[in-house]
Amino acid sequence: MEYKINPMAFTGIFPVPNSLVDENIRLASVVQLKVLLYILRHSNDGMAETETIAGALSLEADDVRDAMVFWSERGLLVKDGQMPAASPVAENKAKSEKNTPVKEEKKVAEIALSRPSYEDVAKRIKESDEVVVLLQEAQTVLGRTIGYDGQSVIIQMLDSFGLPPEVILMAIEYSLSLKKTGWASIARIARRWSEMEIDTLEGAMQYIEEHNIVDETWAKLREETEITNRQPTEKQRKYMVAWVKEYGYDVDIIYCAYEESIDNTGKMSMPYMDKIIRSWHEKGVKTLSDIQNERVKWENEKQKRFSKPPKKAEKTEGEASYDIDEYMKKSFNLQYKKNDTESEV
């Protein structure tokens, strides 16, 4: 069955660059095409906002950002304040025609910051059986076919991030367990592991175990507090890993530290909570009862430290400065001594 454009559809149109079809349509993923078409449709509305696009297309914000970076690299989008430039494809053609050499240092920097091109991906698949097997295994884990978008990310993990194939597959599985199926999320996890030098299955499994425990504890803490972010930030996660994994504290202990922070600073302060929790750990505090005992000790010490000694009783007006009873007792007990000059009767 053949189709043609409905003429009535042209009652409302917007321009689409030729390069979208001529140079990029075979490279772009469905998400990337959706994002670009939405931006083109609303090009008169000003700068494209990530959250707005994500909400309108029911996409993750990370995937939208990833798509915008892709189109920026392809020359169809520019950042605010950035001067428009020719597309990378046009630049490459001009360079090849002029036979202009590319400096090695610049090439290395580009590989570290951006994904491999379509040509680079095809070359790696052709020359490496390891890459072919890795891509096949990744498709099995994901349960879907991987196009250029996914292939470029996986090859970037392998070549730029330096992760072995088994760790890459573990990163994909972990991202899926978090219900983050976008390539931007998967790439972010892989890059973090690379920066943390997690390059073995054992290291990856330890990381996942720590994060699962922390995320579970964080979720429980959110239910009892006014915390709004669904997951802790990287700084908050570092504190939580120490409290949960190193010290062995559960959410009840951490909540007590949260209360102390609110009472003494008026807000949740992770550094302040960390000082409290480290202090409890050094004192051997294990349970809520131990915390209560520590609070009682502190109150007693505070009362001793700040309490004033009792004042001595002050004299009232007309009151003798000596003890009358003691004076009379001593007076009546004195023995009478006869004066030598006194005559006997």
Image: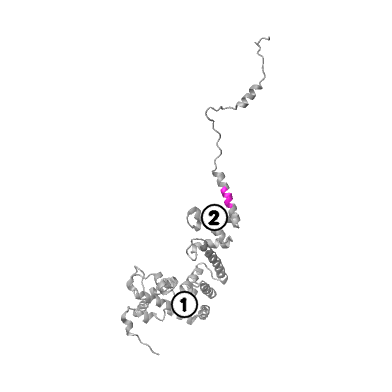
In the rendered image, which residue does mark 1 sit on? 150
Q: Residue furthest left?
A: 11
Circle 1: is it few (<14), some (14-19), or many (20+) Cα within 10 Å?
many
Please state which of the two labelled residues, at mark 1 or mark 2, is closer to the viewer: 2
Q: How many marks?
A: 2
Q: Main secondary structure of the magenta part?
A: helix
The alpha-carbon separation of the residues under discs 1 and 2 comes to 45 Å
Measuring from the top left, give residue 288's x and y in whole percent. Answer: 59, 57
Q: Which residue is mark 2?
A: 276
Q: In the rendered view, tell whether residue 258 sits above or below residue 344.
A: below
Q: In the image shown, does 258 or 211 lie closer to the viewer?
A: 258
Instruction: Say which label, 1 or 2, has the lower sequence index.
Output: 1
Inspect the image, locate mark 1, and give the three-letter code of the amino acid beneath it: Gly
Residue 52 among those drawn in magenta: no
Callout 1–callout 2 Cβ contact below 8 Å:
no
Kind of residue at badge 2: Ile
Judged left or right of residue 175, residue 31 is: left
Please give the range of residues in magenta. Answer: 294-299
The front one of 297 and 91 is 297
Is residue 177 rendered to the left or right of residue 66? Answer: right
The residue closer to the viewer here, 229 or 191, is 229
For residue 104, say whether it is visible.
no
Q: Is residue 214 above or below residue 96?
A: above
User: Which SS class for mark 1?
Assistant: helix
Q: Is residue 218 visible?
A: yes
**Is the image coloured rainbow, by chain, by secondary structure, or in one colour?**
one colour
Q: Give the percent coordinates (x, y) of residue 280.
A: 57, 55
- Looking at the picture, tell me which residue is in the foreground, 241 or 344: 344
Name the spot of residue 259 as percent of width and height, x first.
52, 56
Q: Residue at x 50, y 57 (%)?
A: 271
* Residue 83 screen position, x and y as percent: 33, 70
